[in-house]
Image (spheres, grey):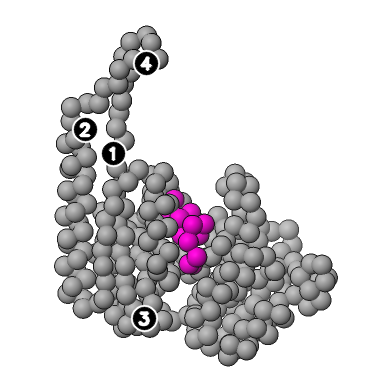
Amino acid sequence: MKNTTTLLVIDIDTADTVVADLAESAFQKQTHLSCLMIGPAPVPPMYAYGISPYGSMHVPDNWGELLNSSRKALIDRESEIEVLLARSGVSADVQSVLCPTADIKNTVARRARVCDTAHIAPNLRAKSDVMHEVAHGVLFNSPIGLILNASPSKHADRVFVAWNTGAAASSAVHVALPYLRTAKDVVVACFDPIATVEGEGADPGTDVAAWLSHHGCSVTVSQFPTGGREVGRCILDRAKEQGADLVVMGAYGHARMIEAIFGGTTRTMIEQTEQPVLLAH
């Protein structure tokens, strides 16, 4: 996607190879790579003294040292990544931010709003609280899509679109349009579709297929029963059967709180690590 900007969210432990792979892909595609390095700010331990609720608060003497040490480590790593990117010759920038976990989503969102797509470094999966905050910032507080598990150098020849008539699915297809236009085949997949005017139309999936065809996409429509199985697992199984290089789907089409508590399709797709997926809300 020439002249676009790709956001890569990393932390101090992200391997050089992760940054280098995306930098090489950005260089080949003539895109700009924007690296955002998140560093968790040390939580200031405070202790109250005295019986009164208005007792004085005490911050340990070494608190400033802890903060400065964390900031220095982040800046040193930022310098190392800048050198790596300079050697690759790619158009790129690096920004490091020290912030509490609760502020990560806002920090990521501010950067994502001026990018075209977002990737999350694989090592952040080991830090589930950080991973979820980054995903939240991209999906809920920015207009772009989040790409997971995708190899930067691999072109998506076959794209599998998990479609329904919801706003999230529509947003995902619009965000993914550059990938759909360059794919050799696009499969529009409807799961347990409701073939009514009030539901998903008389022939679910054909409306979005016609729209994509006007964009020059080679599209086929398939309708699949879930048989009572979880939709996310069905999407993964069918995408594998179809040989999909990328799955496109809407994120959190249902209430996010419900999905967070009981699981859901979005959670399944975010937590799986094998199938490349583009999510948008």
Mark-to-mark CA distance, 1 and 4: 25 Å
The disc labelled 1 sits on which kind of residue?
Pro
Mark-to-mark CA distance, 2 and 3: 44 Å
The residue indicated by pointer 3 is: 3
Q: Residue at x 83, y 70 (%)?
A: 196
Q: Is residue 37 left or right of residue 136?
A: left
Direction front: furthest residue: 54
Q: Secondary structure at mark 4?
A: loop
Residue 135 image offset from top left, x and y in percent? 46, 56
Mark-to-mark CA distance, 2 and 4: 22 Å
Range of residues picked out in magenta: 133-145
Q: Secondary structure at mark 1?
A: loop
Label whose residue precedes the other's in the sequence (1 or 2): 1
Q: Which mark is residue 11?
A: none
Q: Are marks 2 and 4 in contact (CB under 8 Å)?
A: no
How crowded is the residue under tag 4: few (<14 C-alpha within 10 Å), some, or many (20+)? few
The residue indicated by pointer 4 is: 54
Residue 227 vs residue 52, the one in the foreground: 52
- Residue 40's place in the image compared with 119, above or below, is above
The residue indicated by pointer 2 is: 63
